[in-house]
């Protein structure tokens, strides 16, 4: 079973629908005991980093998330919250599970912010990408992105390279939305279910 953390932010319905299409059992909860006992945990997120971290703190989930040993997947803002810090909200301390910093896309000619739409992922190196070819297209909606470093599990180019995905120990992240990324996203979520 996948536990989808419901902390008052995120596109919970589209993530839940994706697991329903895969025939996977899931629950939506913010109950710390239920999360602690989970086989797999998904941290979704749509919104703003500082507010999302406040909600995680208010729900008593910060230390719990840091201590999980089951597979954990952060999607979009959820991945950013797994990083060390974000520029969003004037500088937000995040969970620190990845050492990455999250920065706003720089204003550049020809580059629209937010980055919305399909883009390709390269340099794939995580169990999430079994059966996914380099150059596969996934769906993004974001204005902030994690820097590339040793935890980068997939990179994307948009006015420069950024981490489209992260991986460290039992923690995984997708800046893109696998639940909105067609067959590629279906494969990624299926791989998560097999971890």
Image (cartoon, rainbow, N blue to C red):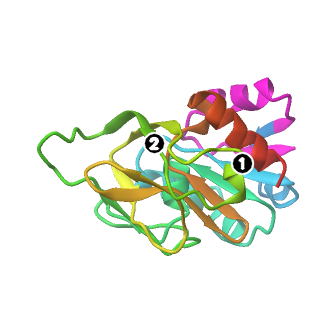
Q: Earlier in the sequence, mark 1 or mark 2?
A: 1
Image height check: is 195 above or below 99?
above
Image height check: is 52 above or below 100?
above
Q: Nearer the viewer, residue 13 or 168?
A: 168
Q: Secondary structure at mark 1?
A: loop
Image coordinates for residue 42, horizontal then vertical, percent:
69, 48
Say which residue appears at 77% left-offset and 40% top-offset.
190
Residue beneath disc 1? 30
Image coordinates for residue 19, horizontal then vertical, percent:
76, 32
- In the rendered structure, the answer to whether residue 101 lies left or right of residue 75 reads left
- In the rendered structure, the answer to whether residue 190 lies left or right of residue 11 reads right
Q: Is residue 89 magenta?
A: no
Image coordinates for residue 58, horizontal then vertical, percent:
58, 58
Q: Nearer the viewer, residue 73 or 29?
A: 73
Q: CA distance from mark 1 to mark 2?
A: 33 Å
Q: Which residues are magenta?
A: 1-26
Badge number at residue 120: 2
- As drawn, which residue projects farthest toward the left? 109
Residue 144 at least partly seen: yes
């Amino acid at each position: 079973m996948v536990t989808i953390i419901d902390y008052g932010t995120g596109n919970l319905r589209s993530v839940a629908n994706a697991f329903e299409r895969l025939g996977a059992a899931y629950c939506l909860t913010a109950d710390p005991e239920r999360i602690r006992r989970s086989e797999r945990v998904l941290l979704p997120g749509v919104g703003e980093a500082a507010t999302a971290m406040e909600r995680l703190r208010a729900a008593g989930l910060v230390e719990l998330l840091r201590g999980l040993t089951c597979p954990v997947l952060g999607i979009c803002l959820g991945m950013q919250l797994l990083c060390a810090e974000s520029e969003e909200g004037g500088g937000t301390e995040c969970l620190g599970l990845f050492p990455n910093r999250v920065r706003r896309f720089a204003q550049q000619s020809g580059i629209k912010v937010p980055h919305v739409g399909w883009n390709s992922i390269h340099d794939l190196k995580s169990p999430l990408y079994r059966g996914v070819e380099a150059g596969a297209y996934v769906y993004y909606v974001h204005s902030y992105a994690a820097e590339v470093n040793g935890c980068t599990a997939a990179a994307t180019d948009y006015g420069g390279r950024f981490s489209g995905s992260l991986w460290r120990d039992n923690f995984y992240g997708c800046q893109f939305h696998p639940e909105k990324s067609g067959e590629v996203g279906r494969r990624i979520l299926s791989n998560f279910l097999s971890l």
